[in-house]
Amino acid sequence: MSSQQPKSFEPGNTPAHDEMLFIVIHQASELWFKQILFELDFVMSVFNKEKINDNSEDLNLVRHRLNRIIKINELLNQQVAILDTMTPLDFLAFRNLLTPSSGFQSLQFRLIEAKLGLQLTKRHEHDYYKRTNAGGFTAEDYAAINKVESELTLLQQVDRWLERMPFFNPQYWTSSNVEAGDTAEHPFWCTYRKIYEEGLVEREKNKLYNFDYVFFEKPIAAFSDEQLKVLRADLSPAAMRAALFIMLYRDFPVFQTSYQILDALIEIDHMMLTGDTGILSWSKE
């Protein structure tokens, strides 16, 4: 309660009333970031297991923890409305006193991004985010981010979890066309691909090639490496196939927990993109 020390209230400066609000919002955000990291560590400890029993409480707890993270993100996003009660002129009244520090340089937020699996090249202003010059991270913080980035991310763990799903194991299918490793001739994909193709209008026919590349890595001769890079998913083709299967049959009880976990991860990704970064970027500007 005594850690709010507005610079503008120091002797020789003109007090800026809204600096207190600015400090409190960012300190509150850091506390919630700490809780998010705490929840993520639990989720990752489950996915890091060699075997995950879908009938145990593990996946239910993962779903619960991810939903808690979503609720925390909702709360963080609502803080922007409070921040909006401060006008740009109110902000400029004390902004120069904080130079060269920046809310953009939140260690915990960078750790959250790294744990989730955001790659360096896909970060906002990736050349700037991990700087150690004036206003940047300390050497200790820089080392902490590098350490997390060198470890297995949640995205990689989920990818591995999905790849282990035995949905397309030939022993569970009666078609004689299914042979070990022969994904293209699998009865499910033969049927689903045909349904997908029939659902495309004439101007969308090229999407069938995209489908084959994303789910089976079939090359597209007409596409350059850069075009293929855009299509390439963060999950492996095998994981993508399992994820699609779960999504298609999400209403079946056996897939409910897995679907809700995937749905929660998508929601967290969306909220991280559109929400928390708003507070950090706002303070930087």
Image (cartoon, grey):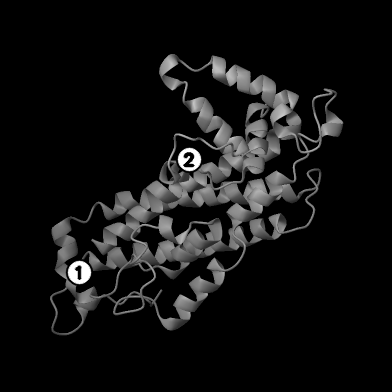
Labels in figure, total: 2
Q: Nearer the viewer, mark 1 or mark 2?
A: 2
x%, y% of residue 109? Answer: 45, 63
Residue 222 lies in what quarter of the image? top left
Residue type at numbered disc 1: Arg
Determine if residue 259 is in view: no
Disc 1 from disc 2: Cα separation: 42 Å
Q: Tell me, for residue 231, which label it has, or none.
A: 2
Q: Residue furthest front?
A: 221
In the depicted structure, whether residue 262 falls above or below residue 248: below
**Is 104 situated above or below 276?**
below
Report x, y in % for residue 138. 40, 81
User: Looking at the rendered structure, which numbered label has been put on residue 190?
Assistant: none
**Residue 95 has which mark?**
1
| Residue 83 image-quadrant placement | bottom left
- The crowd level at tag 2 (other Cα within 10 Å; few <14, some 14-19, many 20+) is few
| Residue at 65 percent of width and 36 percent of height | 241
User: Which residue appears at 29% of the width and 74% of the height?
Assistant: 101
- In what element is the residue under mark 1? helix
